[in-house]
Structure formats: C-alpha cells, structure tokens
C-alpha cells in the first residue's frame, strides 16, 4: 500500500493514470502530453509499473501501457475505514435516533402500543 500511495502522490503520475483510463497508450503518446522530458516520463512510468498501477506490453518497438486499478482498492478500503464511525460513535448515533423517535412519539407523531413514560422532574418544573 505504501508503494501505491507514494506512486499516486505525484501530480504527473496521477495525470498519467487519468490518461490511461481512456485505454492503452504508448510511452511516446504519454510523453507527448507533458511539458517534461521523455526520460522524466519514463521514470514516472517505471514508478507506476513497480507499484502495479500500470502494466506494459512490448509490441515491436512500441511499449504500450495499460491501467490496473486493483492496487488502489487497498488504499480505498483503508480510507473508507477511517471515514466510518467508531464503535461508540455508531452507538451514540443509534441512541440519538431513538431519542428523536421517542420525542416524536410523545408529541403525538405516532401512537405507540406502550404508554409514554412519566415526565421527568425537569419537565414538571418547567410547566
């Protein structure tokens, strides 16, 4: 995962990946789209190839590159896990939902089969 993260950290490499979304391209076609030298693009392609994000195929004198998004899945899963609520956050969210439902039911939003609990002391004092 670290190798993939390092590979996508560079904006030129990210742009190369976006280019390859449209289909396979030769190294020359990729290099022609950037204002940097061909050897520089070759180094970027080598980093992408070593990380598994692109595959190359030699046909005659042309080297074709294709995108492979499989290595990105581990990073995507890791980011998604960070974005999910932790155990307590999830439970507190569920508690908040139940409190909202109970308040709605008390206001007459829906009839419930169980009687509403007696008002708390703070509710009696405010009345």
Image (tube, rainbow, N blue to C red):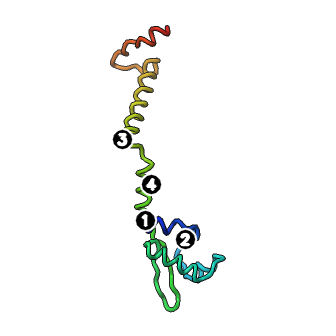
Distance between mark 4 and mark 2 Cα atoms: 20 Å
Direction from residue 4 to residue 14 in the image, left or right: right
Q: Residue at x 53, y 76 (%)?
A: 44
Answer with mark 4 or mark 2, whichever residue precedes in sequence.
Answer: 2
The single residue placed furthest to the bottom in the displayed view is 60
Query: Percent x, y for residue 80?
Result: 43, 52
Q: Which residue is mark 4?
A: 79
* Rendered location of residue 82, percent (x, y): 43, 50
Does label 2 or label 1 sit earlier along the sequence?
A: 1
Secondary structure under the numbered disc 1 in the rendered image: helix
- Report the residue marked by disc 3: 87
Q: Which numbered disc flags the more N-terminal residue, 2 or 3?
A: 2
| Cα distance in 3D space between marks 3 and 1 | 27 Å
Q: Which residue is mark 1?
A: 2
Q: Decide: marks 3, 1 in contact (CB < 8 A)? A: no
Residue ID at (46%, 76%): 49
Label 4's element? helix
Which dot, 3 or 1, sits closer to the camera? 1
99 lies above or below 2:
above
Q: Which residue is mark 2?
A: 13
- CA–CA distance between discs 4 and 3? 17 Å
Distance, label 2 to label 3, CA atoms, is 37 Å
């Amino acid at each position: 995962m670290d190798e993939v993260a390092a590979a996508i950290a560079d904006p030129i490499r990210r742009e190369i990946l976006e280019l390859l979304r449209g289909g396979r391209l030769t190294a020359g076609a990729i290099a022609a789209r950037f204002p940097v030298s061909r050897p520089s693009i070759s180094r970027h392609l080598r980093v992408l190839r070593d990380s598994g994000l692109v595959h190359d195929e030699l046909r005659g004198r042309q080297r074709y590159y294709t995108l492979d998004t499989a290595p990105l899945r581990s990073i995507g899963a890791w980011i998604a896990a960070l974005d999910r609520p932790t155990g307590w956050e999830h439970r507190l969210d569920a508690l908040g939902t139940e409190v909202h439902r109970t308040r709605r039911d008390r206001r007459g939003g829906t009839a419930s089969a169980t009687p509403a609990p007696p008002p708390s002391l703070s509710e009696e004092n405010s009345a």
